[in-house]
Amino acid sequence: MQNHYNLVYREEEREMNPLCRAEGIGLIPWSPLARGFLAGNRKAEGKTGETMRAKSDEFAQSLYFQPEDFAVAERVKQVAAKRGVKPIQVALAWVGTRPGVTAPIIGATKPGHLADAFGALKITLEAEEVKTLEEPYRPHKVLGHG
């Protein structure tokens, strides 16, 4: 199942992920970094960021610019800072440890993206870190499906 799933959009946890696990269907989440939103460079004011994508990705802005989404992204940055790793790596480590996930679609466009993804494989999040990451999440309407 290629599902829309990341720390700021977890609606698949309600029905689709449990169904897939029950039926032995692997999960291959798309947008595990929320179109770069979880990279730690988005700003709530003005819906912009440091990268060209952050400034121009209207689709991402339609998906991930609720106040609660920024609270989740801030938690990702906090956990990453404590560990001395990149927010991208923490967000990917979280997705990679979710039940049923076989491999996320990382959407690498630069060699450094691959290095970051490989670095995420070395991270084992503690239960308290997972709680910190998940706690500010608030349900969303169904997003990303045409």
Image (spheres, grey):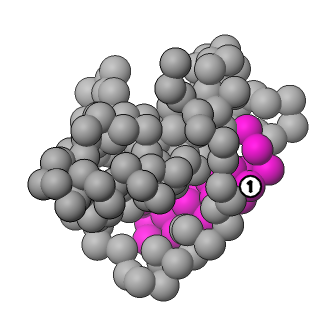
Is residue 79 highlighted in magenta?
yes
Label 1 crowd (10 A; few <14 / some 14-19 / many >=20): some
Residue drawn at x 67%, y 17% as measured from the top left: 58
Whether residue 112 appears in this view of the structure is no
x and y percentages locating residue 19 in the rendered image: 29, 55
Q: Nearer the viewer, residue 37 or 110?
A: 37
Whether residue 11 appears in this view of the structure is yes
Relative to 61, residue 16 above or below: below
Residue drawn at x 29%, y 35% as measured from the top left: 2
Residue assigned mark 1: 68
Magenta stretch? Answer: 65-91
Residue drawn at x 33%, y 27% as measured from the top left: 107
Q: Nearer the viewer, residue 140 or 107?
A: 140
Residue drawn at x 47%, y 59% as measured from the top left: 14
The number of numbered badges drawn on the structure is 1
Relative to 121, residue 110 above or below: above
> Taking 39 as reference, is 101 left or right?
left
Secondary structure beneath dot 1 equals helix
Relative to 47, residue 22 above or below: below
x and y percentages locating residue 4 in the rendered image: 43, 38
> Where the N terminus falls, by quadrant?
top left
x and y percentages locating residue 132 in the rendered image: 57, 75
x and y percentages locating residue 3 in the rendered image: 36, 38
Is residue 97 highlighted in magenta?
no
> Taking 132 as reference, is 47 left or right?
right
In the rendered structure, which amino acid carries the disc numbered 1? Answer: Glu
